[in-house]
Amino acid sequence: MAELGLNEHHQNEVINYMRFARSKRGLRLKTVNSCFQDLKESRLVEETFTVDEVSEVLNGLQAVVHSELESELINTAYTNVLLLRQLFSQAEKWYLKLQTDISELENRELLEQVAEFEKAEFTSSNKKSIIDSMKPKLAPLHEDGAAELLNKATDALDEKSKLERALQDLQLEHGSQKDFIKAQDLSDLENTVAALKSEFQKTLNDQTENQKSLEENLATAKHDLLRVQEQLSMAEKELEKKFQQTAAFRNMKEILTKKNDQIKDLRKRLAKYEPED
């Protein structure tokens, strides 16, 4: 049977989506067929038609079919966006960044491979039943660090499950030999998984430390800004003080002092001419 290069769980998810798409496609084709049937029953009642009448009939049919196809294409695009949203949301919960290659969507060879897969899956008499399982842990297309460690851990757990099933089969054939094999293999595998988990946790801790470092740098920058603002304020006060010490400021102050003295002198003179009580 044609394969898509996916594990069993993900391939079943693809089959579920293809089943949904086939159902929607079938309904839309029925709608288009009904458009033609309605036209036959409602308009094709005469034996002969003029050119204008045929043109009118075809234009009306074109408008209806165009509307149906446009509606379906738009709905298909929106449906694909919702599907991508589900995948990306699951990936973001694991701090992963998925990448897509739009050019692959028009790869004729891959499209034919999908067509063969659909044909084999939905026309075979031995269709596999689809079992709903837990939501998948997505693997990124191009990612390193924590994502790579997660992939390794997932692969290790899958390998552990396979070993356990194989060892259960050996138990029926070899009896006590199974205990030794299981203890040895599972011990090594558990150590591997523990090491991967430790490395994964270390990567997460490093990311936390980087975040703390950025926050500290931000706080330092804020303190530096406050210090610079304070220095500017002091510089302005110093500049004002220096201005007061300039010749122009002293001259103005001297003129004001003379004016004050003149006013005092005039007041004294006027006081001599004021009548006594």
Image (tube, grey):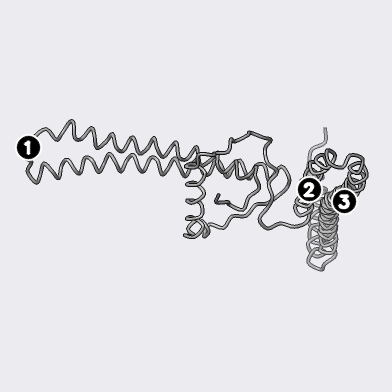
Q: Does residue 154 appear anywhere in the picture? A: yes
In primary-sequence order, the first of circles 1 and 3 is 1
* Residue at the spot of label 1: 47
Q: What's the amino acid at mark 1? A: Glu
Q: Secondary structure at mark 3?
A: helix
Do residues under tags 2 and 3 come within 8 Å of each other at their CB atoms?
no
Q: Amino acid at mark 3?
A: Thr
**Earlier residue among tags 1 and 2:** 1
Give the Cα separation between the discs numbered 2 and 3. Answer: 11 Å
Q: Position of residue 148 (x, y in %)?
A: 76, 54
Mark 2 burial class by Cα count in 10 Å: few <14, some 14-19, many 20+: few
Tell me if mark 3 has few (under 14), some (14-19) or many (20+) residues whose alpha carbon lies within 10 angstroms of its own: some
The residue lying at 56 percent from left, 58 percent from top is 101
What residue sits 17% from the left and 31% below the top? 42
Q: Relative to 129, is 186 on the left or the right?
A: right
In the picture, the disc for residue 209 is: none
Q: Which residue is mark 2?
A: 159
Amino acid tagged 2: Glu
